[in-house]
């Protein structure tokens, strides 16, 4: 086993830039959905199918990433996936029918989730000493992209740019980020069949099945909670509070701003000793804030409470990944891919469940599914993050 130090900052900056572009794709559906629903004459259940197909592709992408990460250089897989994601967005700009568009969402879901899955072990392998901090900054970069997307796309729509054309603007942004990132990650360390040491005592033992399952289900329900807010928060503000589209898009933007703040804060304070308490406390406070947001009688209070939900819960996923992989850096790719399969199942199913309940019992009931999912995250914290290192 060889002792390794953190790589220079250029590699992580390149990954962070490209994952900022990925963050844009996570929230692009929220501002577009009302116009897509109107153009294709869809109900909420049908409208949720864009997110469902994106996440069906995501499941396949995560499985591919897990299978290939031990056989091929992760950097090459990551960069190839980003290229294909850009091409998918370019094709979406020519959308002329419902089935054509959801097929491209499938492609974008597959390629983006290969990126998402592999970005975590790339950071862990190149920054083994500071992996806890760097993983949180990685996810903060995604959050910054996520919060920028809704307002940027909504501003384009306010300028009468057709929603199809916004895919081309997003495609151009991602191409610029890809070009910069490609230059920065040239010296990327990529362990295929090698061992590394973080400077702390490591282990070759696999993660206990009970811990991996608890962490997986925790990610499943967290992803379900998050994707509901990504997909429907802007539309919720428009339909329930009757506010105009631009301020309505602030609901999604400020939720992601809260998550960015959460992840930056966690990057400064997270340790193996406090990870469990940060996750459990955040999930508890997030449940309360989100419940109050959904049933608030005032739109501005509702938006503020959505932002607070992001602050309380945003760091849950990076802290959980850090906790499970911190003593197993050479297994990080396989562990992360297994956990992200659970994430994709949650992201695929919860928009449909929420949309169906909203069609049957109104929008507030559909959004309350997000609260229930977050409560289950809280309940699983003890099992997924034990008191002692495992």
Image (cartoon, rainbow, N blue to C red):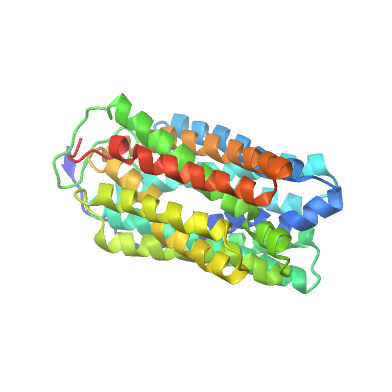
Q: From this view, report whether residue 170 is shown above or below residue 216.
A: below
- Of all residues, the one furthest to the top in this rendering is 209
Residue 273, given in percent of the width and then of the height, sits at 19, 49
Quadrant, the C terminus: top left
Name the side, left or right, on which 7 lies relative to 186.
left
Q: Is residue 189 visible?
A: no
Q: How many marks?
A: 0
Residue 271, given in percent of the width and then of the height, sits at 22, 53
- Of all residues, the one furthest to the bottom in this rendering is 159
Viewer-side residue, 339 vs 113: 339
Residue 208 position by quadrant = top left
Name the side, left or right, on which 114 lies relative to 276.
right
Which residue is depicted at the point 72% across and 40% down? 360
Residue 156, given in percent of the width and then of the height, sits at 73, 70
Viewer-side residue, 233 vs 94: 233
Residue 330 position by quadrant = top left
Residue 55 position by quadrant = top right
Quadrant, the N terminus: top left
Q: Is residue 360 visible?
A: yes
Residue 43, given in percent of the width and then of the height, sits at 79, 45
Which residue is depicted at the point 79% across and 53% down? 36
Name the side, left or right, on which 173 lies relative to 14.
right
Which residue is depicted at the point 43% across and 39% down? 376
- Of all residues, the one furthest to the front in this rendering is 297
């Amino acid at each position: 086993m060889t002792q390794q130090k953190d790589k220079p900052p250029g590699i992580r900056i390149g990954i962070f830039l490209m994952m900022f572009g990925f963050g844009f794709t996570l929230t692009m559906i929220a501002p577009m959905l009302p116009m897509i629903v109107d153009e294709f004459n869809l109900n909420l259940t049908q409208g949720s199918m864009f997110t469902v197909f994106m996440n069906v592709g995501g499941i396949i992408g995560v499985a591919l990433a897990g299978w290939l990460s031990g056989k091929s250089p992760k950097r090459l897989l990551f960069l190839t996936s980003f290229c294909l994601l850009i091409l998918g967005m370019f094709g979406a700009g020519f959308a002329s029918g419902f089935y054509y568009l959801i097929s491209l969402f499938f492609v974008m879901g597959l390629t983006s989730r290969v990126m998402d899955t592999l970005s975590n072990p790339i950071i862990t392998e190149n920054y083994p000493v500071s992996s806890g901090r760097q993983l949180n900054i990685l996810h903060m970069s995604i959050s910054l992209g996520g919060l920028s997307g809704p307002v940027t796309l909504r501003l384009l729509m306010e300028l009468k740019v057709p929603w199809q054309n916004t895919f081309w603007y997003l495609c151009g942004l991602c191409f610029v980020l890809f070009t910069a990132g490609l230059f920065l990650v040239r010296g990327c360390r990529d362990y295929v069949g090698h061992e590394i040491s973080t400077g702390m005592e490591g282990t070759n033992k696999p993660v206990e099945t009970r811990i991996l399952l608890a962490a997986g289900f925790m990610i499943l329900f967290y992803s379900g909670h998050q994707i509901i807010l990504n997909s429907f928060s802007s539309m919720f503000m428009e339909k329930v509070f009757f506010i105009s589209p631009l301020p309505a898009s602030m609901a999604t933007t400020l939720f992601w701003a809260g998550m960015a703040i959460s992840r930056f804060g966690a990057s400064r304070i997270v340790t193996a000793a406090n990870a469990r308490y940060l996750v459990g406390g955040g999930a508890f406070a997030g449940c309360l804030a989100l419940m109050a947001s959904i049933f608030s009688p005032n739109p501005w209070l509702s938006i503020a409470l959505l932002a607070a939900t992001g602050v309380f819960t945003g760091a849950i996923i990076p802290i959980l990944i850090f906790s499970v992989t911190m003593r197993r850096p050479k297994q990080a790719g396989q562990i992360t891919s297994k956990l992200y399969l659970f994430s994709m199942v949650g992201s695929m199913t919860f928009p449909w469940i929420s949309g169906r309940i909203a069609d049957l019992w109104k929008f507030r009931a559909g959004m309350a599914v997000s609260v229930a999912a977050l409560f289950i995250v809280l309940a699983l914290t003890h099992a997924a993050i034990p008191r002692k290192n495992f």
